[in-house]
Image (cartoon, grey):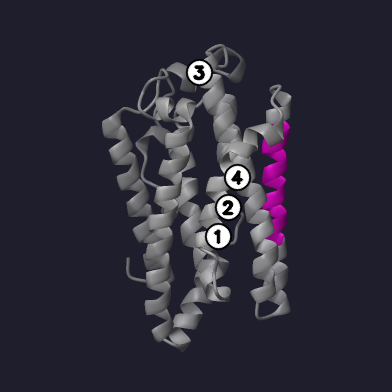
Amino acid sequence: MRFMTTSDKPDNTADTAEATGIAAQDWETAAADPQYRAAVVDLLGALAYGELAAFERLAEDAKLAPTLLDKAELAKMAAAEFHHFERLRDRLAGIGEEPTRAMEPFVAALDGFHKQTAPSDWLEGLVKAYVGDSIASDFYREVANHLDSDTRGLVLAVLDDTGHAGFAVEKVRAAIDEDPRVGGRLALWARRLMGEALSQSQRVVADRDALSTMLVGGVADGFDLAEVGRMFSRITEAHTKRMAALGLAA
């Protein structure tokens, strides 16, 4: 899921900088580089499976919802995630790639992450959605700054806040107000999510040569190693802000 608000996003001035190089090109021009094309296919495949997995997980989390209204809210979120999946699937097909094949390399890593971070109750599920999955969103937003204009537009669209960040914050803060002891448990849970999410992101990139090459600057307009460090610093800072919004200590 993608619970993002403007203040949650990493402070990345590249968002407003004038586009140059690949970032100023459209897909048809940029895709002439086979290594860049492979990196984009990997990125879209990872995102597509992430959205599909989020849809499935929301259906499970709905079983933990305490009220019918909460179940309905999760159903709306699930519908938004599936719509995002459809857009990514259709884009892969539109550029001549088989969507299932593009997603398959990421199934084991993402399923492993969700298995390791299965929530035990409703509140842990909300924290995972708001904090845990948003770390992945931050990572993909950073990568989007270095994509061609067509792909960047799609990636940013599917990472958009579905409008439910306030829902998660409201429910978690209300629970903490009712029983302050809940805060300590959820803070530990959120720290675990942070570690698992960063490890999962690093594993995915390390296993895919095209993606890792783009990140360290092997593809024109990619990151350099110093920028990778700054990127993860921005992601960590955004995580701290989300923790504060929930009333939890980072």
What's the distance in space between the residues labelled 4 and 3, CA to CA?
22 Å
* Residue named by callout 1: 115
The residue shown at (70%, 33%) is 99
Please give the residue where the numbered disc 3 appears in the rendered image: 35
From the image, give the main secondary structure of the stretch colored magenta.
helix
Which residue has dot 2 on it? 111
The residue nearer to you, when weighing 119 against 182, is: 119
Residue type marked 4: Val
33 relative position to 241: left or right? right
Decide: marks 4, 1 in contact (CB < 8 A)? Answer: no
| Label 1 residue SS | helix
Q: Are marks 1 and 2 in contact (CB under 8 Å)?
A: yes
User: Residue 70 placed where, x, y %?
Assistant: 67, 74
Using the image, determine if residue 36 lies above or below residue 48.
above
Q: Residue at x 52, y 13 (%)?
A: 33
Query: Residue beneath label 4, please?
Result: 107
Q: Quadrant of residue 114?
A: bottom right
Write the start and end of the magenta stretch as one range: 76-91
Which percent across, then down, holds residue 227?
A: 30, 33
Q: CA distance from mark 1 to mark 3?
A: 32 Å
* Residue type, mark 2 in image: Asp
Spatial separation of the CA atoms under disc 1 and disc 2: 6 Å
Dot placed on the residue nearer the N-terminal end, 4 or 1: 4
Mark 1 or mark 3, whichever is nearer to me? 1
